[in-house]
Image (tube, rainbow, N blue to C red):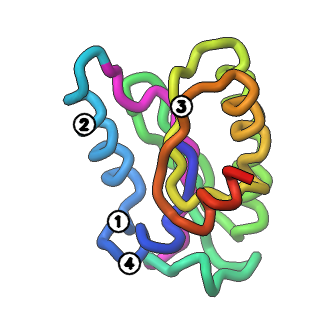
Amino acid sequence: VIGSSGGGTATLGHTEAAELLRTIHEELRKVEDAVGITNAIFVSLHGGKGFDSASDTDTAMLYSAKGDCSVELMKTGMLKDVNKRCVELDQELAKRISDGEIQGLICISCDVDLHASTLRAAAATKIPVTGSGGTSLSAASS
């Protein structure tokens, strides 16, 4: 899973990033032979603020999940600093996709610039990609 709390997720009661990731993980595990979330990179703004009105100095949190959806708060700080760390994690995830370790990708209001490496790797390896967030999915598909 790559993405953020921007757009619809910020307004649909999904302001708790760790809970959202765990919920997606549990739903995925209901699918036959699915393992759920093994990797996630997710950015959330403090107080449930939406990304439509965000600035680089807003407080943001970067969450990561590994293994059996073990969610960890990786960084809290200004959005511009959180985004820098996000790009680093994105490059690591892209390598895992390229190495064949990831079988599918879910994008939730993902910033295509922050997640460019992962999206390129997903396209190159032709793994299935799905998600939510019309604007971001449209940008990711182009």
Name the mark on residue 14: 1
Q: Amino acid at mark 1?
A: His
Residue for badge 2:
26
Whole-number angstrom distance, CA of label 3 to CA of label 1: 24 Å
Whole-number angstrom distance, CA of label 2 to CA of label 1: 15 Å
Q: Which residue range is magenta in the image? A: 34-47
> In this rendering, would 18 be left or right of 65?
left
Whole-number angstrom distance, CA of label 4 to CA of label 2: 22 Å
In the rendered image, residue 77, in percent from the top left (x then y), is placed at: 66, 65
Residue 14 visible to an observer of this rendering = yes
Q: Nearer the viewer, mark 3 or mark 1?
A: 3
Name the mark on residue 128: 3
In the image, residue 4 sits, relative to residue 13, either above or below, namely: above
In the rendered image, residue 135, in percent from the top left (x then y), is placed at: 60, 68
The mark nearer the N terminus, 4 or 2, is 4
In the rendered image, residue 45, in percent from the top left (x then y), is placed at: 54, 71
In the rendered image, residue 137, in percent from the top left (x then y), is placed at: 59, 57
Name the mark on residue 68: none
Asked if disc 3 and disc 4 are in contact, CB closer than 8 Å, the reply is no
The mark nearer the N terminus, 2 or 3, is 2
Q: Residue at x 30, y 71 (%)?
A: 13
Whole-number angstrom distance, CA of label 3 to CA of label 4: 27 Å
Q: Amino acid at mark 4?
A: Thr
